[in-house]
Image (cartoon, rainbow, N blue to C red):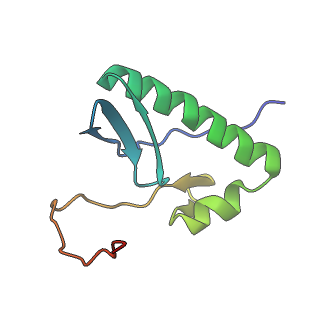
């Protein structure tokens, strides 16, 4: 079954965690990893395809995208736009983490 599609530019953050590269998309709150940056990107694209395929199959695209902050635009034609978030800065926050005695 063919579905209508739109193109959207999604932010993708890539960072190294131990010996893996993590690809994270805040607009969808999805991440994956790979041994190299290119592998992480490739894995992300594969996961993204599966994610949207499953949303379509389940009929939950509108619900999930709305919950993630996307908005439906009706003009000039109906489509979805990802949230417009700008990465401002990276910072750390000190927290107390409980540890077993």
Instruction: Residue 64: tell me if it is visible.
Output: yes
For image coordinates 33% across by 31% down, the residue present is 20
Above or below, 86 against 47 in this view is below
Q: Is residue 37 left or right of residue 4?
A: left
Snapshot quadrant of residue 92? bottom left
The residue lying at 81 percent from left, 50 percent from top is 58
Q: Is 22 placed above or below 77 here?
A: above
Going 57% across and 54% down the picture, which residue do you hit? 80
| Residue 3 horizontal side relative to residue 1, left or right | left
Q: Nearer the viewer, residue 62 or 21?
A: 21
Q: How many marks?
A: 0
Across and down, in percent, residue 15 comes to 26, 40
Q: Position of residue 67 (x, y in %)?
A: 59, 68
Is residue 81 depicted above or below 12 in this figure?
Answer: below
Q: Position of residue 9 (x, y in %)?
A: 41, 42
Kindly tell me whether residue 73 is visible in this rendering. Answer: no
Q: Quadrant of the C terminus?
A: bottom left
Q: Point out the residue furthest to the front here.
A: 101
Pinpoint residue 98: horizontal percent, then vertical percent: 34, 76
Drawn side of residue 34 relative to residue 97, left or right: right
Depth check, front residue: 44 or 81: 44
**The N terminus lies in which quarter of the figure?**
top right
User: Is 49 situated above or below 81?
Assistant: above
Splitting the image into 4 quarters, where does residue 54 fall?
top right
Residue at (75, 45) in percent of width and height: 56
């Amino acid at each position: 079954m063919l579905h209508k599609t739109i193109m959207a530019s999604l932010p993708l953050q890539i960072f190294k965690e131990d010996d893996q590269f993590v690809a994270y998309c805040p607009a969808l709150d999805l991440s994956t990893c790979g041994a190299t940056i290119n592998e992480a990107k490739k894995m992300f694209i594969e996961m993204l395809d599966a994610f949207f395929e499953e949303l379509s199959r389940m009929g939950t695209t509108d619900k999930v995208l709305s919950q993630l902050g996307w908005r439906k635009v009706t003009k000039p034609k109906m489509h979805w736009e990802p949230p417009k978030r700008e990465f401002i800065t990276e910072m750390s926050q000190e927290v107390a983490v409980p540890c077993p005695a």
